[in-house]
Image (tube, grey):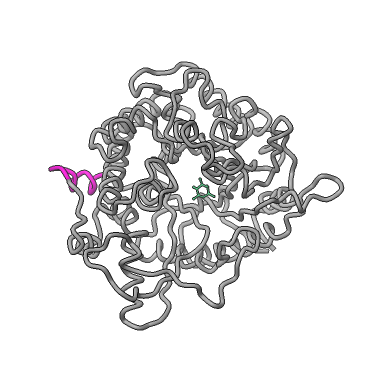
Amino acid sequence: MKKFPDGFLWGAAASAPQTEGAALIDGKAPTTWDKWFEMNPEKFYKGVGPKDTSNVYQQYAEDVQLMEDMSLNSYRTSISWARLLPDGKTLNQQAVDFYRNYFVSLIEKGVEPIINLFHFDMPWWLMEKGGWESRESVEDFGYYAKVAFEQFGDLVHRWTTFNEPIVHVECGYLFEFHYPAVVDFKRAVQVGYHTLMAHTQAVEEFRRGKHTGEIGIILNLTPVYSKSDAPEDIKAKDMADALNVKSFLDPVVLGHFPTELVQLLKENNLLPATETGDKEKLAQTTIDFLGVNYYQPKRVQAVNQPAVPAKMPSDLYAEYDWPEKKINPYRGWEIYPEALYDIAMRIKNDYKNIPWYVSENGMGVAEEERFVDEDGVIQDDYRIEFVQDHLAELHKAVEQGSHCFGYHMWTFVDCWSWLNGYRNRYGFYRVDIENDFKRTPKKSSFWMKTVIENNAID
Ligand code: FCB
Protein backbone atom coordinates (compact mmCIF):
# COMPACT_ATOMS: atom_id res chain seq x y z
CA MET A 1 0.00 0.00 0.00
CA LYS A 2 1.23 3.48 -0.83
CA LYS A 3 0.04 5.69 2.03
CA PHE A 4 -0.55 9.41 1.70
CA PRO A 5 0.18 11.80 4.58
CA ASP A 6 -2.35 12.07 7.41
CA GLY A 7 -4.97 14.71 6.80
CA PHE A 8 -4.51 14.48 3.02
CA LEU A 9 -7.35 16.24 1.20
CA TRP A 10 -9.40 14.00 -1.06
CA GLY A 11 -12.05 15.58 -3.14
CA ALA A 12 -13.28 16.98 -6.38
CA ALA A 13 -13.48 20.33 -8.08
CA ALA A 14 -16.09 22.24 -10.01
CA SER A 15 -17.12 25.82 -10.61
CA ALA A 16 -20.23 27.96 -10.26
CA PRO A 17 -20.88 28.56 -13.96
CA GLN A 18 -20.39 24.90 -14.85
CA THR A 19 -22.69 23.47 -12.21
CA GLU A 20 -25.16 25.88 -10.65
CA GLY A 21 -27.58 26.50 -13.49
CA ALA A 22 -30.13 29.11 -12.36
CA ALA A 23 -28.18 31.48 -14.58
CA LEU A 24 -30.68 34.28 -14.65
CA ILE A 25 -32.82 33.86 -11.57
CA ASP A 26 -32.83 35.05 -7.94
CA GLY A 27 -31.04 38.24 -8.81
CA LYS A 28 -28.07 36.84 -10.71
CA ALA A 29 -26.87 39.17 -13.45
CA PRO A 30 -25.60 37.83 -16.80
CA THR A 31 -21.99 36.86 -17.42
CA THR A 32 -20.17 36.81 -20.75
CA TRP A 33 -21.25 33.16 -21.08
CA ASP A 34 -24.93 33.96 -20.65
CA LYS A 35 -24.68 36.77 -23.18
CA TRP A 36 -22.59 34.86 -25.67
CA PHE A 37 -25.06 32.00 -25.58
CA GLU A 38 -27.89 34.45 -26.18
CA MET A 39 -25.99 35.89 -29.17
CA ASN A 40 -24.60 32.66 -30.70
CA PRO A 41 -26.29 29.52 -29.34
CA GLU A 42 -25.00 27.55 -32.34
CA LYS A 43 -21.45 27.82 -30.97
CA PHE A 44 -22.40 25.61 -28.01
CA TYR A 45 -22.40 21.83 -28.32
CA LYS A 46 -25.96 20.63 -28.96
CA GLY A 47 -27.17 24.13 -28.11
CA VAL A 48 -26.72 23.52 -24.37
CA GLY A 49 -25.77 26.77 -22.69
CA PRO A 50 -24.85 27.99 -19.23
CA LYS A 51 -28.40 28.18 -17.96
CA ASP A 52 -28.68 24.40 -18.20
CA THR A 53 -25.69 23.41 -16.11
CA SER A 54 -26.06 20.60 -13.55
CA ASN A 55 -28.71 22.32 -11.40
CA VAL A 56 -26.60 22.47 -8.26
CA TYR A 57 -28.43 25.64 -7.28
CA GLN A 58 -31.48 23.46 -6.57
CA GLN A 59 -29.81 20.10 -5.97
CA TYR A 60 -26.77 20.84 -3.85
CA ALA A 61 -28.13 19.00 -0.80
CA GLU A 62 -28.32 15.80 -2.82
CA ASP A 63 -24.74 16.26 -4.05
CA VAL A 64 -23.45 16.91 -0.57
CA GLN A 65 -25.04 13.66 0.56
CA LEU A 66 -23.32 11.83 -2.31
CA MET A 67 -20.01 13.38 -1.28
CA GLU A 68 -20.47 12.01 2.20
CA ASP A 69 -21.35 8.59 0.72
CA MET A 70 -18.07 8.70 -1.18
CA SER A 71 -16.13 9.86 1.90
CA LEU A 72 -14.81 13.06 0.31
CA ASN A 73 -13.27 15.39 2.88
CA SER A 74 -13.06 18.48 0.65
CA TYR A 75 -14.69 20.05 -2.37
CA ARG A 76 -13.76 23.06 -4.46
CA THR A 77 -16.20 25.23 -6.26
CA SER A 78 -16.45 28.93 -7.03
CA ILE A 79 -18.72 31.81 -6.16
CA SER A 80 -20.44 33.53 -9.03
CA TRP A 81 -19.44 37.20 -8.93
CA ALA A 82 -22.51 38.13 -11.01
CA ARG A 83 -24.75 36.36 -8.51
CA LEU A 84 -23.19 37.86 -5.39
CA LEU A 85 -22.87 41.42 -6.69
CA PRO A 86 -25.17 41.72 -9.71
CA ASP A 87 -24.06 45.28 -10.50
CA GLY A 88 -20.63 45.05 -8.89
CA LYS A 89 -21.74 46.99 -5.80
CA THR A 90 -25.08 45.82 -4.43
CA LEU A 91 -25.11 42.67 -2.34
CA ASN A 92 -27.66 40.07 -3.46
CA GLN A 93 -29.02 38.56 -0.25
CA GLN A 94 -30.41 35.52 -2.10
CA ALA A 95 -26.90 34.71 -3.24
CA VAL A 96 -25.55 35.07 0.28
CA ASP A 97 -28.23 32.72 1.59
CA PHE A 98 -27.59 30.16 -1.16
CA TYR A 99 -23.84 30.04 -0.66
CA ARG A 100 -24.07 30.04 3.14
CA ASN A 101 -26.55 27.16 3.13
CA TYR A 102 -24.45 25.27 0.60
CA PHE A 103 -21.18 25.72 2.52
CA VAL A 104 -22.80 24.89 5.89
CA SER A 105 -24.24 21.69 4.47
CA LEU A 106 -20.80 20.68 3.18
CA ILE A 107 -19.18 21.37 6.53
CA GLU A 108 -21.87 19.41 8.36
CA LYS A 109 -20.98 16.38 6.26
CA GLY A 110 -17.27 16.72 6.94
CA VAL A 111 -16.49 18.19 3.52
CA GLU A 112 -14.29 21.27 3.63
CA PRO A 113 -15.33 23.90 1.08
CA ILE A 114 -12.37 25.37 -0.79
CA ILE A 115 -13.69 28.44 -2.51
CA ASN A 116 -12.46 30.09 -5.67
CA LEU A 117 -13.49 33.58 -6.74
CA PHE A 118 -13.19 33.59 -10.52
CA HIS A 119 -13.62 30.71 -12.94
CA PHE A 120 -13.86 32.33 -16.39
CA ASP A 121 -17.22 33.96 -15.55
CA MET A 122 -16.83 37.65 -16.20
CA PRO A 123 -19.92 39.66 -15.23
CA TRP A 124 -21.40 41.36 -18.26
CA TRP A 125 -21.40 44.82 -16.63
CA LEU A 126 -17.62 44.55 -16.32
CA MET A 127 -17.16 43.23 -19.84
CA GLU A 128 -19.02 46.28 -21.07
CA LYS A 129 -16.26 48.45 -19.72
CA GLY A 130 -13.49 46.30 -21.15
CA GLY A 131 -13.28 43.34 -18.76
CA TRP A 132 -9.72 42.55 -17.69
CA GLU A 133 -8.41 44.94 -20.32
CA SER A 134 -9.57 47.81 -18.16
CA ARG A 135 -7.45 48.70 -15.15
CA GLU A 136 -10.70 49.33 -13.26
CA SER A 137 -11.20 45.56 -13.16
CA VAL A 138 -8.46 45.37 -10.52
CA GLU A 139 -10.39 47.52 -8.01
CA ASP A 140 -13.68 45.88 -8.92
CA PHE A 141 -12.27 42.42 -8.27
CA GLY A 142 -10.72 43.57 -5.00
CA TYR A 143 -14.12 44.81 -3.84
CA TYR A 144 -15.81 41.54 -4.81
CA ALA A 145 -13.14 39.55 -2.97
CA LYS A 146 -13.53 41.70 0.15
CA VAL A 147 -17.31 41.14 0.18
CA ALA A 148 -16.85 37.39 -0.31
CA PHE A 149 -14.36 37.18 2.58
CA GLU A 150 -16.72 39.15 4.84
CA GLN A 151 -19.80 37.13 3.96
CA PHE A 152 -18.26 33.65 4.04
CA GLY A 153 -14.99 33.98 5.91
CA ASP A 154 -16.39 32.22 8.97
CA LEU A 155 -17.12 29.13 6.85
CA VAL A 156 -14.29 29.08 4.34
CA HIS A 157 -10.66 28.77 5.36
CA ARG A 158 -9.00 28.04 2.06
CA TRP A 159 -9.60 30.61 -0.65
CA THR A 160 -8.28 30.88 -4.17
CA THR A 161 -8.53 33.98 -6.32
CA PHE A 162 -8.50 32.59 -9.87
CA ASN A 163 -8.78 29.28 -11.65
CA GLU A 164 -6.31 28.92 -14.53
CA PRO A 165 -5.96 32.63 -15.27
CA ILE A 166 -3.95 31.93 -18.41
CA VAL A 167 -6.99 30.24 -19.91
CA HIS A 168 -9.22 33.30 -20.06
CA VAL A 169 -6.22 35.20 -21.45
CA GLU A 170 -5.56 32.71 -24.25
CA CYS A 171 -9.10 31.64 -24.94
CA GLY A 172 -10.53 35.16 -24.90
CA TYR A 173 -7.72 37.03 -26.67
CA LEU A 174 -5.81 34.52 -28.78
CA PHE A 175 -7.76 31.38 -29.60
CA GLU A 176 -11.41 32.55 -29.84
CA PHE A 177 -12.83 29.98 -27.43
CA HIS A 178 -14.13 32.50 -24.89
CA TYR A 179 -15.85 35.85 -25.29
CA PRO A 180 -14.75 38.42 -26.58
CA ALA A 181 -12.93 35.98 -28.92
CA VAL A 182 -10.42 38.47 -30.30
CA VAL A 183 -6.96 37.60 -31.59
CA ASP A 184 -4.45 40.08 -30.29
CA PHE A 185 -1.25 39.06 -28.47
CA LYS A 186 -0.67 42.49 -26.97
CA ARG A 187 -4.18 42.76 -25.58
CA ALA A 188 -3.83 39.22 -24.26
CA VAL A 189 -0.72 40.21 -22.30
CA GLN A 190 -2.52 43.23 -20.85
CA VAL A 191 -5.44 41.04 -19.79
CA GLY A 192 -3.02 38.67 -18.09
CA TYR A 193 -1.29 41.52 -16.32
CA HIS A 194 -4.50 43.02 -14.96
CA THR A 195 -5.67 39.59 -13.88
CA LEU A 196 -2.50 39.21 -11.90
CA MET A 197 -2.90 42.64 -10.33
CA ALA A 198 -6.53 41.77 -9.48
CA HIS A 199 -5.18 38.68 -7.75
CA THR A 200 -2.75 40.79 -5.68
CA GLN A 201 -5.60 43.15 -4.77
CA ALA A 202 -7.63 40.24 -3.43
CA VAL A 203 -4.70 38.85 -1.45
CA GLU A 204 -4.19 42.31 0.02
CA GLU A 205 -7.89 42.54 1.01
CA PHE A 206 -7.69 39.10 2.61
CA ARG A 207 -4.72 40.04 4.76
CA ARG A 208 -6.02 43.52 5.58
CA GLY A 209 -9.28 41.99 6.79
CA LYS A 210 -7.31 39.61 9.04
CA HIS A 211 -9.43 36.69 7.90
CA THR A 212 -8.56 33.30 9.26
CA GLY A 213 -7.21 30.70 6.88
CA GLU A 214 -5.14 30.83 3.77
CA ILE A 215 -5.23 32.27 0.31
CA GLY A 216 -3.82 30.96 -2.94
CA ILE A 217 -4.44 30.63 -6.65
CA ILE A 218 -5.09 27.74 -9.02
CA LEU A 219 -2.76 27.46 -11.99
CA ASN A 220 -2.75 24.96 -14.83
CA LEU A 221 0.88 24.01 -14.85
CA THR A 222 1.35 22.43 -18.23
CA PRO A 223 4.90 21.09 -18.16
CA VAL A 224 6.73 21.76 -21.38
CA TYR A 225 9.04 19.15 -22.92
CA SER A 226 11.24 19.91 -25.91
CA LYS A 227 11.49 17.69 -28.96
CA SER A 228 15.26 17.43 -28.72
CA ASP A 229 18.32 18.83 -26.99
CA ALA A 230 19.10 21.04 -29.97
CA PRO A 231 19.58 24.62 -28.76
CA GLU A 232 16.70 25.94 -30.90
CA ASP A 233 14.28 23.37 -29.46
CA ILE A 234 15.43 24.14 -25.94
CA LYS A 235 14.94 27.83 -26.62
CA ALA A 236 11.42 27.14 -27.90
CA LYS A 237 10.71 25.12 -24.77
CA ASP A 238 11.99 27.92 -22.54
CA MET A 239 9.79 30.47 -24.27
CA ALA A 240 6.73 28.25 -23.98
CA ASP A 241 7.54 27.70 -20.31
CA ALA A 242 8.01 31.42 -19.64
CA LEU A 243 4.71 32.31 -21.28
CA ASN A 244 2.58 29.44 -20.03
CA VAL A 245 4.02 28.43 -16.68
CA LYS A 246 6.33 31.03 -15.16
CA SER A 247 4.18 34.00 -16.22
CA PHE A 248 1.82 33.42 -13.29
CA LEU A 249 3.76 30.99 -11.13
CA ASP A 250 6.78 33.22 -10.53
CA PRO A 251 4.91 36.38 -9.53
CA VAL A 252 2.46 34.62 -7.19
CA VAL A 253 5.03 32.42 -5.43
CA LEU A 254 8.29 34.37 -5.77
CA GLY A 255 6.83 37.88 -5.94
CA HIS A 256 8.36 38.93 -9.26
CA PHE A 257 8.24 38.26 -12.99
CA PRO A 258 10.88 36.00 -14.51
CA THR A 259 13.48 38.14 -16.29
CA GLU A 260 13.34 35.96 -19.40
CA LEU A 261 9.62 36.67 -19.75
CA VAL A 262 10.12 40.42 -19.45
CA GLN A 263 12.88 40.19 -22.05
CA LEU A 264 10.74 38.13 -24.39
CA LEU A 265 7.80 40.53 -24.15
CA LYS A 266 10.10 43.51 -24.67
CA GLU A 267 11.70 42.03 -27.79
CA ASN A 268 8.27 41.48 -29.28
CA ASN A 269 6.72 44.84 -28.32
CA LEU A 270 4.31 43.12 -25.99
CA LEU A 271 5.02 44.73 -22.62
CA PRO A 272 1.79 45.69 -20.81
CA ALA A 273 0.95 49.08 -19.29
CA THR A 274 1.73 49.09 -15.56
CA GLU A 275 1.27 51.49 -12.66
CA THR A 276 3.63 52.74 -10.00
CA GLY A 277 3.55 50.50 -6.99
CA ASP A 278 2.60 47.33 -8.91
CA LYS A 279 6.02 45.80 -8.46
CA GLU A 280 6.01 46.31 -4.70
CA LYS A 281 2.49 44.96 -4.46
CA LEU A 282 3.50 41.78 -6.26
CA ALA A 283 6.40 41.32 -3.89
CA GLN A 284 4.16 41.77 -0.85
CA THR A 285 1.32 39.46 -1.80
CA THR A 286 2.89 36.06 -2.33
CA ILE A 287 0.45 33.23 -1.73
CA ASP A 288 0.06 30.77 1.16
CA PHE A 289 -0.63 27.73 -1.00
CA LEU A 290 -0.93 26.74 -4.62
CA GLY A 291 -3.54 24.71 -6.51
CA VAL A 292 -2.28 22.90 -9.59
CA ASN A 293 -4.52 21.71 -12.40
CA TYR A 294 -2.87 19.11 -14.55
CA TYR A 295 -4.28 17.35 -17.58
CA GLN A 296 -1.58 16.97 -20.21
CA PRO A 297 1.88 18.29 -21.03
CA LYS A 298 2.92 20.55 -23.89
CA ARG A 299 5.53 19.23 -26.33
CA VAL A 300 7.32 21.81 -28.38
CA GLN A 301 9.95 22.37 -31.01
CA ALA A 302 11.46 25.41 -32.73
CA VAL A 303 9.33 27.16 -35.34
CA ASN A 304 10.43 26.96 -38.95
CA GLN A 305 10.06 30.59 -39.82
CA PRO A 306 10.07 32.79 -36.74
CA ALA A 307 8.10 36.03 -37.19
CA VAL A 308 9.50 39.05 -35.38
CA PRO A 309 7.77 40.64 -33.59
CA ALA A 310 5.59 37.66 -32.74
CA LYS A 311 1.90 38.04 -33.56
CA MET A 312 0.95 34.79 -31.84
CA PRO A 313 2.68 32.41 -29.41
CA SER A 314 2.93 30.02 -32.38
CA ASP A 315 5.50 32.44 -33.86
CA LEU A 316 7.73 31.62 -30.90
CA TYR A 317 7.37 27.88 -30.49
CA ALA A 318 5.59 25.08 -32.32
CA GLU A 319 3.77 22.16 -30.77
CA TYR A 320 4.62 18.73 -32.09
CA ASP A 321 3.31 15.21 -31.84
CA TRP A 322 5.49 13.04 -29.68
CA PRO A 323 5.52 9.63 -31.40
CA GLU A 324 5.44 7.76 -28.08
CA LYS A 325 2.43 9.67 -26.89
CA LYS A 326 -0.26 7.70 -25.10
CA ILE A 327 -3.64 9.15 -25.96
CA ASN A 328 -6.97 9.20 -24.21
CA PRO A 329 -8.91 7.60 -27.09
CA TYR A 330 -12.17 9.16 -25.92
CA ARG A 331 -11.01 12.78 -25.81
CA GLY A 332 -7.74 13.01 -27.72
CA TRP A 333 -5.63 14.45 -24.91
CA GLU A 334 -2.24 12.99 -24.06
CA ILE A 335 -2.02 10.88 -20.89
CA TYR A 336 1.34 11.38 -19.20
CA PRO A 337 1.22 10.86 -15.42
CA GLU A 338 5.01 11.33 -15.10
CA ALA A 339 4.49 15.05 -15.58
CA LEU A 340 2.75 15.23 -12.23
CA TYR A 341 5.95 14.01 -10.59
CA ASP A 342 7.95 16.59 -12.55
CA ILE A 343 5.61 19.39 -11.47
CA ALA A 344 5.78 18.27 -7.85
CA MET A 345 9.57 18.22 -7.82
CA ARG A 346 9.81 21.56 -9.57
CA ILE A 347 7.60 23.14 -6.93
CA LYS A 348 9.80 21.58 -4.28
CA ASN A 349 13.10 22.63 -5.82
CA ASP A 350 12.36 25.96 -7.50
CA TYR A 351 9.29 27.32 -5.73
CA LYS A 352 10.17 27.29 -2.06
CA ASN A 353 8.54 23.88 -1.56
CA ILE A 354 5.31 25.82 -1.09
CA PRO A 355 2.35 23.75 0.15
CA TRP A 356 0.28 22.77 -2.86
CA TYR A 357 -2.42 20.39 -3.93
CA VAL A 358 -3.67 18.89 -7.17
CA SER A 359 -6.72 21.05 -7.67
CA GLU A 360 -7.80 19.34 -10.91
CA ASN A 361 -6.82 16.18 -12.70
CA GLY A 362 -9.16 14.04 -14.70
CA MET A 363 -10.19 12.26 -17.82
CA GLY A 364 -12.84 13.52 -20.19
CA VAL A 365 -14.77 10.96 -22.17
CA ALA A 366 -17.02 11.79 -25.10
CA GLU A 367 -20.35 9.97 -25.27
CA GLU A 368 -19.64 8.10 -22.09
CA GLU A 369 -23.14 6.61 -22.18
CA ARG A 370 -21.70 3.88 -24.39
CA PHE A 371 -20.05 2.39 -21.30
CA VAL A 372 -23.25 1.94 -19.28
CA ASP A 373 -23.89 -1.63 -18.15
CA GLU A 374 -27.30 -3.27 -17.65
CA ASP A 375 -27.52 -1.89 -14.10
CA GLY A 376 -27.05 1.66 -15.34
CA VAL A 377 -23.50 1.96 -13.99
CA ILE A 378 -20.83 3.47 -16.23
CA GLN A 379 -17.92 1.03 -16.28
CA ASP A 380 -15.16 3.63 -16.34
CA ASP A 381 -12.15 1.38 -15.75
CA TYR A 382 -10.13 3.77 -17.95
CA ARG A 383 -10.72 6.51 -15.33
CA ILE A 384 -9.67 4.24 -12.48
CA GLU A 385 -6.45 3.45 -14.30
CA PHE A 386 -5.89 7.13 -15.04
CA VAL A 387 -6.26 8.17 -11.40
CA GLN A 388 -4.23 5.24 -10.09
CA ASP A 389 -1.33 6.10 -12.41
CA HIS A 390 -1.37 9.78 -11.51
CA LEU A 391 -1.59 9.04 -7.81
CA ALA A 392 1.41 6.71 -8.05
CA GLU A 393 3.52 9.53 -9.50
CA LEU A 394 2.23 11.95 -6.91
CA HIS A 395 3.00 9.52 -4.13
CA LYS A 396 6.57 9.17 -5.32
CA ALA A 397 7.03 12.94 -5.19
CA VAL A 398 5.47 13.20 -1.74
CA GLU A 399 7.87 10.52 -0.50
CA GLN A 400 10.68 12.67 -1.88
CA GLY A 401 9.54 15.67 0.09
CA SER A 402 7.23 17.63 -2.20
CA HIS A 403 4.72 19.36 0.07
CA CYS A 404 1.50 18.19 -1.60
CA PHE A 405 -1.52 18.17 0.72
CA GLY A 406 -4.32 16.87 -1.48
CA TYR A 407 -5.76 15.54 -4.68
CA HIS A 408 -8.96 16.73 -6.33
CA MET A 409 -10.51 15.20 -9.39
CA TRP A 410 -12.30 17.12 -12.04
CA THR A 411 -15.12 16.51 -11.26
CA PHE A 412 -17.74 15.16 -8.88
CA VAL A 413 -20.94 15.18 -10.93
CA ASP A 414 -20.55 15.49 -14.72
CA CYS A 415 -20.64 19.15 -15.51
CA TRP A 416 -20.96 21.60 -18.36
CA SER A 417 -17.75 22.42 -20.23
CA TRP A 418 -17.96 25.83 -21.89
CA LEU A 419 -18.43 25.52 -25.65
CA ASN A 420 -18.33 21.73 -25.35
CA GLY A 421 -21.44 21.59 -23.14
CA TYR A 422 -21.96 18.03 -21.90
CA ARG A 423 -19.93 16.40 -24.65
CA ASN A 424 -17.02 15.24 -22.50
CA ARG A 425 -17.88 13.71 -19.17
CA TYR A 426 -15.44 13.84 -16.25
CA GLY A 427 -17.45 13.02 -13.13
CA PHE A 428 -17.49 10.26 -10.55
CA TYR A 429 -21.26 10.57 -10.97
CA ARG A 430 -23.09 10.57 -14.23
CA VAL A 431 -25.73 13.23 -14.75
CA ASP A 432 -28.71 12.77 -17.01
CA ILE A 433 -29.55 16.21 -18.30
CA GLU A 434 -32.71 14.96 -19.99
CA ASN A 435 -34.05 13.33 -16.86
CA ASP A 436 -34.20 15.91 -14.06
CA PHE A 437 -30.43 15.93 -13.78
CA LYS A 438 -30.52 12.50 -12.16
CA ARG A 439 -27.18 11.48 -10.64
CA THR A 440 -25.89 7.88 -10.85
CA PRO A 441 -22.55 6.68 -9.46
CA LYS A 442 -19.94 5.43 -11.91
CA LYS A 443 -17.67 2.50 -11.10
CA SER A 444 -14.81 4.92 -10.36
CA SER A 445 -16.75 6.45 -7.45
CA PHE A 446 -16.72 3.13 -5.59
CA TRP A 447 -13.04 2.60 -6.31
CA MET A 448 -12.17 6.13 -5.20
CA LYS A 449 -14.11 5.72 -1.96
CA THR A 450 -11.80 2.86 -1.02
CA VAL A 451 -8.71 4.90 -1.87
CA ILE A 452 -10.00 7.75 0.30
CA GLU A 453 -10.86 5.49 3.21
CA ASN A 454 -7.47 3.80 3.08
CA ASN A 455 -5.72 7.12 2.43
CA ALA A 456 -3.62 4.98 0.11
CA ILE A 457 -3.38 3.29 -3.28
CA ASP A 458 -2.31 -0.28 -3.92
C1 FCB B 1 -10.00 22.96 -16.94
C2 FCB B 1 -10.98 23.93 -16.34
C3 FCB B 1 -12.31 23.35 -16.01
C4 FCB B 1 -12.74 22.22 -16.90
C5 FCB B 1 -11.59 21.27 -17.17
C6 FCB B 1 -11.94 20.11 -18.03
O1 FCB B 1 -9.12 23.61 -17.78
O2 FCB B 1 -10.49 24.47 -15.14
O3 FCB B 1 -13.21 24.41 -15.99
O4 FCB B 1 -13.33 22.69 -18.07
O5 FCB B 1 -10.55 21.97 -17.74
In the image shown, does 430 or 330 lie closer to the viewer? 330
Callout count: 0
Residue 230, by quadrant, is bottom left
Range drawn in magenta: 274-284
| Residue at the spot 33% in from the left edge and 20% down from the top edge | 89
Left or right: residue 103 versus residue 88 is: right
Nearest the viewer among 154 and 261 is 261
Q: Main secondary structure of the magenta part?
A: helix
Q: Position of residue 292 (x, y in %)?
A: 46, 53
Image coordinates of residue 423 in percent, x first then y, are: 62, 47
Q: As rendered, which of 102 and 119 lies closer to the eye?
A: 119
Query: For the C terminus, which image quadrant?
Result: bottom right
Q: Quadrant of residue 152?
A: top left
Q: Is residue 337 magenta?
A: no
**Residue for point 18% across, 64% down:** 267
- Relative horizontal placement of residue 448, taking residue 163 as reference (left or right): right
* Magenta span contains residue 279: yes
Q: Position of residue 368 (x, y in %)?
A: 71, 51
Q: State left or right for residue 16 relative to residue 72.
A: left
Q: In this rendering, is residue 67 above or below 279?
A: above
Left or right of residue 306, residue 171 in this image: right
Residue lying at the far right of the rendered structure: 374
